[in-house]
Image: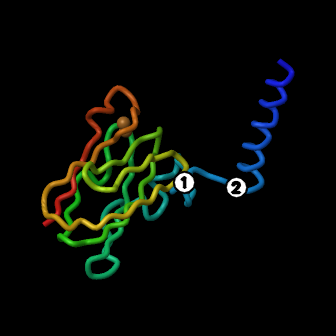
Amino acid sequence: MTFVVIMMVVFLATISTAAVVDGLVPPSHVQAIDPTKVSETPPFDHPGLRKVADGTYEAYYVARIFSFTPQHLEIPAGSRVTFYVTSADVEHGFSVPLTGVNTMVTPGWVSTVSHTFKTPGKYLLVCNEYCGAGHQLMAGDIEVK
Ligand code: CUA
């Protein structure tokens, strides 16, 4: 019993030290945001697609129960898109099946993931973290033309 308690204390001390002293956060969560002020915080006050250069885009998404904003995105085939996603309420998922786009969306953080859409078509965007009674309705699409 004593050994178990000592191990627990060592374990918690190690995690706390890493979190507080080294500032460790979950992977891909590099930018912080106040989740109660998402709709007033640029660029999330106007979510959507931004053209960075020919073939390079940034897409800003807000996830909230039970929808994504924007719901629909159109991009030219061959485009490289970097998604910046944050949540205005609870933990959500952001997944585009059959691509490498799959990240958790945690309130307070901006998740980032990039993908080059080579093949034209309509891609489904889904929430793959259970977020409440309407979770299964939380979806959007990305049209690659
Ligand atoms: Cu959002 Cu499930």
Residue at position x 39%, y 51% in the image: 62
Mark 1 — residue? 27
Q: Is residue 65 visible?
A: no
Q: Is residue 48 visible?
A: yes
Q: Quadrant of residue 16?
A: top right
Q: Which mark is residue 59?
A: none
Q: Please state the horizontal and vertical placement of residue 46, each as a whole percent of the image.
A: 37, 61
Determine the residue located farthest toward the bottom in the rendered image. Answer: 54
Q: Nearer the viewer, residue 44 or 6?
A: 6
Q: Is residue 102 left or right of residue 23?
A: left
Residue at position x 36%, y 48% in the image: 94
Determine the residue located farthest toward the top in the rendered image. Answer: 1
> 42 above or below 27?
below
Residue at position x 31%, y 75% in the image: 56
Q: Please state the horizontal and vertical placement of residue 76, each as a whole percent of the image.
A: 18, 71
Determine the residue located farthest toward the right in the rendered image. Answer: 2
Secondary structure of residue under mark 2: loop
Residue at position x 70%, y 55% in the image: 23
Mark 2 — residue? 23
* Label 2 CB sits under 8 Å from any ligand 1 atom: no
